[in-house]
Amino acid sequence: KKMVMVIDLAKCRNARKCLEGCQKMHFLPPHMEWIKFYLMRDTEDQAPYWFPKPCLHCNNPPCVKVCPVGATFKRTDGIVLIDNDRCIGCKFCMAACPYSSRVFNWEEPKLPKAAHKQPYSPETSTPPKIGTVSKCDFCPDMVRKGELPACVKSCPNGVFYYGDKNEDAVTNGTDTVLFSELLESRAAYRFMEELGTEPSVYYLPVVDRAFDYKSGSEGLSEDKIALYKKEAKITE
């Protein structure tokens, strides 16, 4: 297998339900985000759009190369995982990742009893451990069960497609399409591909967007909205 994800930017409205599903599945606190959201604008003449960014599970991952203990590794199916039983918290992988996809567990996780009882596995990334690094893991335990990752299942707008590149099929839970046809017909691209990391996450450009970007500000604090606008260089 070769697991890939396709993110349709035209459908994203910053609902953040994908993040909520991810946090619930992995027992993450609200401040720990494995999926980061950015308000992007390609030029000052173009409208802004929301850009969700999980770990890109690179085929040529710099994080794997710098880990001194082999805690970060890439599987044959392309998924990049972290073994927190081996992680020493040196943060070399965080420094090497050009996408800032990793977070550090500074605090002792507050977990429900069910999480404490289950054995640790790199496939679930739970229970998390203080002093280690964590990130989006593509939910390989769910894939093993024939289910979709938490972000895909939780998104109400069908933004995330997930599947096996070798089978040439991806699905967002509602629609199943040919991976190759989706990339060709929608002119997909990979984020910062010029770095040579060869991400396994593809983006579909914003064409016929389903939502105005302002709808993604609902429920956010004024400070958060101001920060998003500043990053996208929006003046109103």
Image (cartoon, helix red, strand yellow):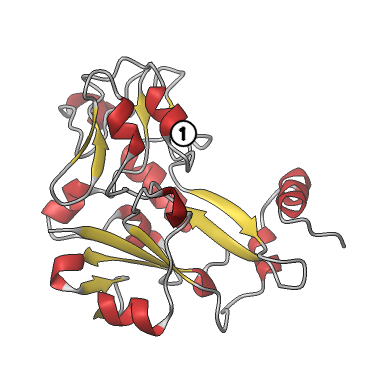
Left or right of 134 on screen, residue 75: left
Residue 140 against residue 9 in the figure, above or below = above
Left or right of 58 on screen, residue 157: right
Spot occupied by residue 48 in the image (x, y as percentages of width and height): 68, 66
- Secondary structure beneath dot 1 equals loop
Q: For this rendering, which residue is in front, 55 or 149?
A: 55
Q: What residue type is labelled 1?
A: Pro
Q: Which residue is drawn at 40% across and 43% down?
A: 23
Spot occupied by residue 234 in the image (x, y as percentages of width and height): 79, 59
Spot occupied by residue 111 in the image (x, y as percentages of width and height): 35, 27
Q: Name the residue under label 1.
A: 29
Q: Quadrant of residue 5?
A: bottom left
Spot occupied by residue 178 in the image (x, y as percentages of width and height): 24, 80
Number of callouts: 1
Image quarter of the N terminus:
bottom left
Q: For this rendering, which residue is in front, 13 or 235?
A: 235
Left or right of 212 on screen, residue 69: left
Residue 157 against residue 228 in the figure, above or below = below
Q: In which quarter of the image is residue 122?
A: top left
Residue 67 in view, yes or no = yes
Left or right of 201 on screen, residue 228: right
Image quarter of the C terminus:
bottom right
Say few, some or many: other residues with alpha carbon within 10 Å of mark 1 (under 14 / 14 to 19 / 20 or more): few
Q: Which residue is drawn at 41% across and 21% down?
A: 91
Q: Residue at x 27, y 77 (%)?
A: 180
Q: Which residue is drawn at 12% across and 52% down?
A: 144
Residue 15 in view, yes or no = no
